Amino acid sequence: EKQYLVHDNCPLDYCREKSTSFAYNEIDKQCSNNRRDRLCGRCLKNYSLSLGTGHCKRCHNFNLFWLVFFAIAGVALVVLLLVLRLTVAEGTINGFIFYVNIFYIRKYDFLGPTQNVLDVFLAWVNLDFGIESCLY
């Protein structure tokens, strides 16, 4: 006898979008992006969560070179904020970043699953440049 687990609020990109039927001992069938377990909360064996997304992927040692890039980019961002005397703790820029973050979290509710110019803009404001990298 098949049993069903129904949850309409699966974490973003963890579950398949279409309805899936599966036996109670086959719950991984509902998962996408190389995920497994209850509510697709774990990566498959030999996979790791990639930085910047909720996707699980096989990682290689070459990905560790991204650490150097992110370290330099982080320092450059802080220097840019200091030189331009920008503050993200108050004022208009704080409100803008706050509302963009809220919108970005719920973007699939507002924009649907398709990617458009607004989706790319929201990602860039959140410093999500689409680089899927493993840091183990």
Image (tube, grey):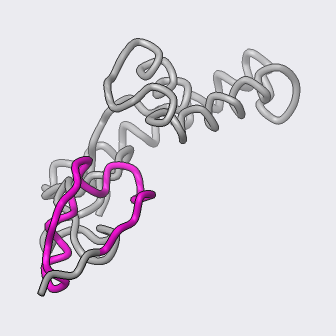
Q: Is residue 13 within the magenta segment?
A: yes
How many callouts does the rendering have? 0
Residue 59 vertical position relative to residue 36 in the rendered view, above or below: above
Q: Residue furthest right?
A: 91
Q: Nearer the viewer, residue 2 or 22?
A: 2
> Residue 86's spot in the image, x, y percent?
78, 22
State left or right for residue 116 relative to residue 30.
Answer: right
Tell me which residue sits at (54%, 41%) in the image.
105
Tell me which residue sits at (22%, 55%) in the image.
19
State left or right for residue 18 relative to residue 79.
Answer: left
Indicate the quadrant containing the N terminus: top left, top right, bottom left or bottom right. bottom left
Q: Nearer the viewer, residue 79 or 32?
A: 32
> Residue 124's spot in the image, x, y percent?
48, 24
Q: Quadrant of residue 69?
A: top left
Indicate the quadrant containing the C terminus: top left, top right, bottom left or bottom right. bottom left
- In the image, which residues are magenta? 5-31
State left or right for residue 42 relative to residue 127.
Answer: left
Residue 30 vertical position relative to residue 119 in the rendered view, above or below: below
